[in-house]
């Protein structure tokens, strides 16, 4: 009947790097760009130091490091770069997608959830994963494109990292389902920076976590899952 409250849309959110896949897609991308000499030794050194500081939980400029990576694509046509990143996903990342992530996504969908991947990784990579795996939507880091349809080194908005994941998720869900028209039922993450997202969920799950999130999970009594896989050998 009109006027009666409707059930809220149930949301299940999965982090991408380290949760849905084994390892980090940006790290593998940097390795490939170094091998192909698309970024300079100095740039690779800067990215390496950034990674060390990030590992030590020191505050870092998330947009800056993405701009360093996209030096490799600065001024190139968006379609060309997107094709490169799609191919990169197929060659390097698809074999790292965890079967248990697939299983959990399917189970959430069968329960009636909208399954969303929220990721700091670059959008074309996550879009390619969405073509091959059972999630409905994605929210990931997008790089700016200029008026001529060419990529720049600037992030479009903010990198989808840490607290920005829940901010971006709320913005997206409010826009699609209406404010108050959805609820975050499940969240899956592996890194201490995923804590805000996990806190927002009714049922948080910690997946093959780093040491920081392991300690947080133990303190909060969160369920810890082991989704680790042995990646098939091949071209890396």
Image (tube, rainbow, N blue to C red):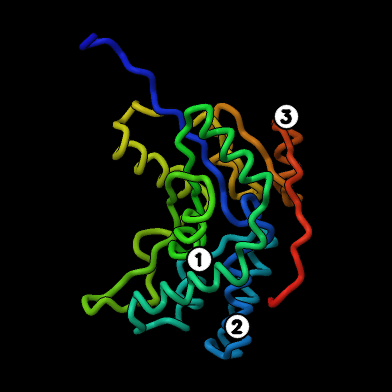
Taking the spot 24% from the left edge, 9% from the top edge, the residue there is 1
Dot 2 or dot 1, earlier in sequence? 2
Percent position (x, y) of residue 97?
64, 56
From the viewer's perspective, is the residue at label 3 or at label 1 nearer? 3
**Residue for badge 1:** 61
Quarter of the picture holding the C terminus:
bottom right
Q: CA distance from mark 2 to mark 1?
A: 16 Å
**Residue for badge 2:** 44
**Residue for badge 3:** 221
- Marks 3/1 in contact by CB < 8 Å: the verdict is no
Q: Nearer the viewer, residue 42 or 38?
A: 38
Q: Which element is circle 1 on?
A: loop
Q: CA distance from mark 2 to mark 3?
A: 39 Å
Taking the spot 41% from the left edge, 77% from the top edge, the residue there is 81
Q: Is residue 69 left or right of residue 152?
A: right
Q: Which element is circle 2 on?
A: helix
Dot 3 or dot 1, earlier in sequence? 1
Q: Nearer the viewer, residue 51 or 58?
A: 51
Percent position (x, y) of residue 144?
33, 69
Taking the spot 63% from the left edge, 86% from the top edge, the residue there is 35
Q: Is residue 17 left or right of residue 178?
A: right
Percent position (x, y) of residue 184?
48, 31
Q: Residues within 10 Å of mark 1 (few under 14, many from 20)?
A: few
């Amino acid at each position: 009947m009109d006027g009666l409250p409707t059930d809220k849309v149930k949301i299940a959110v999965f982090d991408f790097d380290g949760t849905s896949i084994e390892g980090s897609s940006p790290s593998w991308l940097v390795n490939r760009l170094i091998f192909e000499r698309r970024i300079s030794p100095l740039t690779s050194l800067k990215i390496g130091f950034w990674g060390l500081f990030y590992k030590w939980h020191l505050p870092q400029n998330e947009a800056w490091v993405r701009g360093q990576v996209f030096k490799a694509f600065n001024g190139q046509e968006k379609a060309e770069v997107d094709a490169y990143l799609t191919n990169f996903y197929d060659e390097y990342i698809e074999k790292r997608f965890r079967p248990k992530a697939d299983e959990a996504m399917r189970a959430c969908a069968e329960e009636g959830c909208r399954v969303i991947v929220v990721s700091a990784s670059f959008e074309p990579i996550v879009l390619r994963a969405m073509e091959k795996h059972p999630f409905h939507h994605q929210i990931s880091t997008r790089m700016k494109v200029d008026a001529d349809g060419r990529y720049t080194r600037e992030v479009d908005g903010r990198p989808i990292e840490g607290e920005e994941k829940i901010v971006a998720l709320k913005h997206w869900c409010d826009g699609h389902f209406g404010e108050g028209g959805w609820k975050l039922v499940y969240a899956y993450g592996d890194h201490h920076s995923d804590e805000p997202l996990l806190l927002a969920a009714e049922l948080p799950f910690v997946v093959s976590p780093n040491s920081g999130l392991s300690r947080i999970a133990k303190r909060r009594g969160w369920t810890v899952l082991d989704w680790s896989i042995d990646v098939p050998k091949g071209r890396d």
